[in-house]
Image (cartoon, coloured by chain):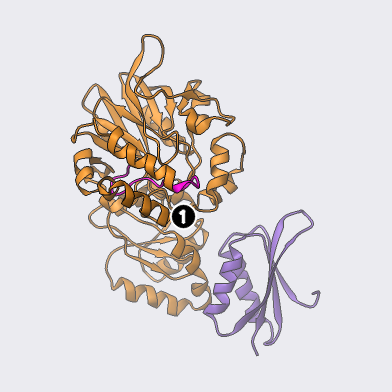
């Protein structure tokens, strides 16, 4: 978990979680995984659509959680394809 | 280019040169619910994340579709992603406006359409265009009542203030399941009675003044409103139509312009369908063909008559509306065939309207999301 480059998009509404994720994923080496933590429930479908719109990434996992402030979170793991 | 409000967009869509809509939500949200207007709306769905991923190709998709014609309004769920895309398009010289607040604002916005403004009784139709919900303000002198108010109460308060009217009573034609009623809150704030049928509201926690079938509505011993209540069960057991000034039939969800109400939302499709059929034929029988039917929902906005009012004469509906033409057996079969698919939020909305549950603003928006599904043929 700790090894992933992480984008904290909590409290941000669309389009910002994906805009920030795009900026970060462009900067990581191929094969690595980017972890995005969002609180916007709309991000679940949007991340699925975003990886489909590109041939360069794949969605490893999406999971719901809760952060230390008790907010519901949506964590998206996106791998940059080799 | 400035942001456009939801009512401004609806007005523009009603004009002879309506704008085209670029919807930048994901495909799933887009397929569930979209912007509609009195004319067919020319709409393209390109999700905003495609602009994030491939800006040039996405812009080209839009310019190819536009073909240099018309102006463009960009729409998303809450207004953020559409502002982002509108800015990209503006940067490339395209005249793109943004719908402020997105589909959330679209679902809450209303426009006011006068139905009768000359006689002693005045009547306005309030159209919640994004959801197809209709409500009414009726006035005689300075006294006014509001019927089937939705929870965006500002539109009624503004109308009352502009027309210098005093709110004297609030009505709901039935226990709504598709949207949260604004009636109880409007009545409470103005300290007036909330009228509805106890056949729908018995057991609820909302204080209701029962509507008595066939009786004119009274504000006091000497003050009688030009409104007669007619028990018209079927969509719900307590569904009540209001006959205003002997001319306007505020039919609730009993009868729409193109269709009848759904009798299956209470899980007793066959019985309620029989009730509804009896209502449409026996109960409405004494009303003459010139009566103007004003329903609580519009199944489609493209059939609104000139002036933007959703209405039809009872005579025209008797000739053209299938719900009024089917015999009892065919009507019951149709209702049973369509039964069973009430949207998931409807049970909770009913509980809220009965005053037995509450929900925060955000949950209300989620519960009400999408178009109403109260008509028999619409799914």
| Quadrant in the picture for residue A43 | bottom right
Label 1: how many Cα within 10 Å (few below 14, some 14–19, many 20+): many
Residue lying at 41% horizontally and 33% vertically, measured from the top left: B173
Residue stretch rendered in magenta on the structure? B255-269
The percent position of residue A69, horizontal first and vertical second, equals: 77, 54
Task: Determine which residue is flagged by label 1.
Answer: B103
Which of A67 and B194 lies nearest the eye of the viewer?
B194
User: Where does the N terminus of chain A fall, quadrant-wise?
Assistant: bottom right
Q: Which chain is depicted orange?
A: B
With A68 as the anchor, is A28 left or right in this view? left
In the picture as drawn, the residue positioned furthest to the front comes out as B329
Residue B253 at least partly seen:
no
Residue B266 at least partly seen:
yes
Question: In the image, is residue B361 part of the stretch drawn in magenta?
Answer: no
In the picture as drawn, the residue positioned furthest to the bottom comes out as A82
B360 vs B122: above or below: below
| Quadrant in the picture for residue B232 | top left
Q: Which chain is depicted purple?
A: A
The percent position of residue B71, horizontal first and vertical second, equals: 31, 62
Label 1 element class: helix
The percent position of residue B314, horizontal first and vertical second, equals: 23, 39
In the picture as drawn, the residue positioned furthest to the top comes out as B222
Residue lying at 56% horizontally and 68% vertically, measured from the top left: A46
């Amino acid at each position: 978990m700790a090894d992933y480059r992480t984008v904290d998009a909590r409290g941000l509404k669309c389009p910002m979680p994906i805009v920030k994720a795009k900026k970060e994923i462009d900067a990581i080496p191929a094969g690595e995984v980017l972890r995005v933590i969002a609180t916007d429930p709309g991000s679940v479908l949007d991340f699925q659509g975003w990886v489909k719109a590109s041939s360069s990434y794949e969605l490893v996992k999406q999971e719901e959680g809760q952060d230390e402030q008790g907010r519901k979170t949506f964590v998206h793991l996106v791998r940059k394809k080799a | 280019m400035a942001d456009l409000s939801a009512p401004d967009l609806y007005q523009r869509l009603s004009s002879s040169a309506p704008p085209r809509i670029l919807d930048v939500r994901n495909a799933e949200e887009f397929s569930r619910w979209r912007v509609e207007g009195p004319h067919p709306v020319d709409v393209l769905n390109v999700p905003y994340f495609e602009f994030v991923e491939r800006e040039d190709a996405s812009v080209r998709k839009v310019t190819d579709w536009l073909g240099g014609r018309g102006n463009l309004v960009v729409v998303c769920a809450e207004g953020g992603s559409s502002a982002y895309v509108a800015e990209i398009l503006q940067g490339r010289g395209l005249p793109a406006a943004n719908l402020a607040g997105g589909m959330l604002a679209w679902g809450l916005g209303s426009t006011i359409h006068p139905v009768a403004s000359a006689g002693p009784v005045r009547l306005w139709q309030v159209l919640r265009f994004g959801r197809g919900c209709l409500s009414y303000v009726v006035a005689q002198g300075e006294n006014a009542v509001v019927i089937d108010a939705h929870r965006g109460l500002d539109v009624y308060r503004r109308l009352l203030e502009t027309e210098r009217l005093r709110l004297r009573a609030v009505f709901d034609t039935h226990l709504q399941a598709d949207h949260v009623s604004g009636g109880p809150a409007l009545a409470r704030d103005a300290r007036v009675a909330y009228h509805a049928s106890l056949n729908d509201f018995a057991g609820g926690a909302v204080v209701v003044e029962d509507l008595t079938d066939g009786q004119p509505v009274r504000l006091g011993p000497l003050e009688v409103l030009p409104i007669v209540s007619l028990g018209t069960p079927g969509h719900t057991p307590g569904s009540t139509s209001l006959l205003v000034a002997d001319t306007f039939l505020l039919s609730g969800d009993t009868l729409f312009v193109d269709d009848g109400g759904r009798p299956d939302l209470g899980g007793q499709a066959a019985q309620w369908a029989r009730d509804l059929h009896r209502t449409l034929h026996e109960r409405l029988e004494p009303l003459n063909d010139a009566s103007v039917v004003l329903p609580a929902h519009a199944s489609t906005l493209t059939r609104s008559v000139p002036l933007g009012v959703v209405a039809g004469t009872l005579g025209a509906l008797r000739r053209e509306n299938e719900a009024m033409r089917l015999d009892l057996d065919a009507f019951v079969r149709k209702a049973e065939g369509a039964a069973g698919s009430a949207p998931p939020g409807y049970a909770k909305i009913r509980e809220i309207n009965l005053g037995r549950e509450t929900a925060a603003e955000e949950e209300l928006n989620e519960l009400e999301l999408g178009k109403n599904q109260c008509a028999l043929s619409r799914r």
